[in-house]
Image: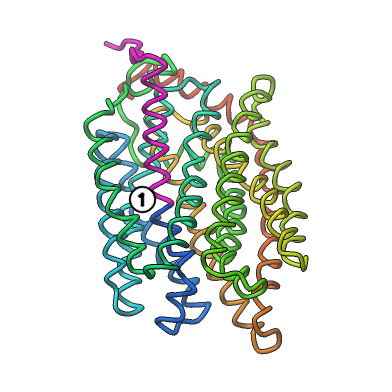
Amino acid sequence: MTQKTRLPTSSGYRSYVLTLLTIVYAFNFIDRQILVILQESIKTDMNLSDSQLGLLTGFAFAIFYVSVGIPIARWADVGNRRNIVALAISVWSIMTALSGLAQNYVQLLLARIGVGVGEAGGSPPAHSMISDYYPAEQRGRALSIYSTGVYIGILCGFLIGGFINQYFGWRIAFFAVGIPGLLIALLVRFSIREPERGASDEIQRSNAPTIAETFSTLWRLKSFRLLAFGTGLTAFTGYGVGNFLPSFLIRSHEFTILQVGISLSMIAGFGGIIGTYFGGYCADKLGLKDQRWYLWVSVAAGLVGTPFMLFAFYLESSTLVLIMLFFAILCGACYLGPTIAITHTLVHPRMRAMASAVLFFILNLIGLGLGPVFVGVVSDFLAPSLGSESLRYSLAITTAFGVLGCIIFALAARKLPYDLQLQSDSTKDRELNPAG
C-alpha cells in the first residue's frame, strides 16, 4: 500500500536546516581552499613546482573525491543522510588538521587525499535533503543559498589563511580551520531531522531505484549528459583560475600573502555569494514560465563574465584587476544552484543524491581534477620564455574553456523540455507500480 507523504516542518525549521547545511558546505570549502592561499609558502618551504601545486590542489584531491562520491551517494539514497553528512565533516576536518603535520610533499598529498575522501560525503546527501525540504519552485534558490557555502568558505579561508600564514605559519592555519569542524559535525548529528523522501514533491512512497536503474535514467536524459559536461567545463575555468589567483597576484602584482588573503576574501567571497544567490533567484523566477531558464541563466552569466576575467589578467592597475575579478567571479558563480536544481527536477527523489554525485563526479573530475593541473603545466611550459609572467598567459588560455561550457549549456537547454516530459511520465509509472 502506498501513501502520499509530507514532512510537517515549519518554515523556520527549514531555514535552520538550510543555514546549518550551508555552514557545513562553507567548512567544506574552507578546508579545501585553505591550501590555495598557503600554496606559495608551501612551495617555498618544500621547493615545489607549479605542476606539483596543480596536482596537490587539483587532481590528487579530485580523483579520490569523485571515486568515493558515487558509493557514498548510493548509501545516501537508501540510508540516513544526516548521519552521513555528520560523519563526512568529521573525517575531512581531522584530515585537514593532519595536513599541518606533513613534513614532505608525499605526506601532504596523502593528507589532502584524506580531505577529498571526507568531503565526498558532504554535498550529495545535503542536496537530497534540501530537495525534500523545499518544493520545486523554491529549489533553485534553496540550493543556491546552500551553494553560497562555496564562497563563504573561500572568503573565510582566504582571510583566515592569509592572516594566520602571515603571522604564525601555514601549519597552524591547517589546525585552525580543521578542528572547529568537529563541533559542527555534532550540531548536524543532534539537531537536524532526516526528512521524508519526496516530501516536498507530494509523491507516493516507492522502493529505492537500483544503481543500474539510476545510471540508466541519467544516461537516457540527453539534457543531463550535456549539462553535466557544461558544468565540468565551467568548473575547469573556475578551479583552474581560482586556485592560482593568489599566485598570480603575488607574482604579477607583488601582493603580500596577507594582501592576497584580504583582497580575495572580499572579491571572491562577496562576489561569489551574490552571484550564486542571483543565479538561483533568476532561474526560479524565469523558470516558472520556461524551465530552460535554469540553463539559459548559466549561458548568459558565463558569456558576460568572460571579458571581465580576461581584462583582469592584462590590466596593469591592481585596483582595476580586483574590480574585474569581482564581476568575473560574480558571473562565474551563477551556474551552480540552477544546474543542481534542474538535475533534481529531472530525476526521482530517491535518485537525487546519486544524481548529484554523478554531476559532481563530472564537475570535479574535469574542473577540479584537470583545471589546476592544466594551468600549472602550461605555466611551467611557458616559464622559460615568459618567466614569472607565464602564469598570466596560462590563466588567460584556461578562461576559454568557460565559453565552451556556455555552448554546451545552450545545447542542453534544447533537449530539456523533452527530457522533463520523459521523466514526468516515468515518475507517474513508478507511482502506479511502486514495487517495480
Q: Which quarter of the image is occupied by the C terminus?
A: top left
Q: Residue 62: x percent and y percent?
A: 43, 60
Q: Secondary structure at mark 1?
A: loop
Mark 1, Cα crowd under 10 Å, few <14 / some 14-19 / many 20+, is many
Q: Nearer the viewer, residue 10 or 214?
A: 10
Q: Which residue is mark 1?
A: 120
Residue 313 falls left or right of residue 106: right
Using the image as rendered, state which of residue 343 and residue 305 is in the foreground: 305
Q: Identify the residue shown where x is 50% and y is 29%.
A: 142
Extreme residue toward the front, this view = 167
Q: Is residue 234 left or right of residue 15?
A: right
Residue 7, quarter of the rendered image: top left
Q: Is residue 14 magenta?
A: yes
433, above or below 159, in the image: above
Q: Residue at x 66, y 89 (%)?
A: 384
Can see residue 153? Answer: yes
- Residue 240 pos. (x, y %): 58, 63
- Extent of the magenta region: 1-29
The image shows residue 146, relative to residue 121, as above or below, that is: above
Say which quadrant the N terminus sits in: top left
Residue at 65% over, 23% down: 285
Place of residue 242 in the rendered image (x, y in percent of width and height, measured from the top left):
57, 60
Left or right: 151 with respect to 131? right
Q: Nearer the viewer, residue 305 or 352?
A: 305
- Residue in view at x 48 percent, y 64 percent: 36
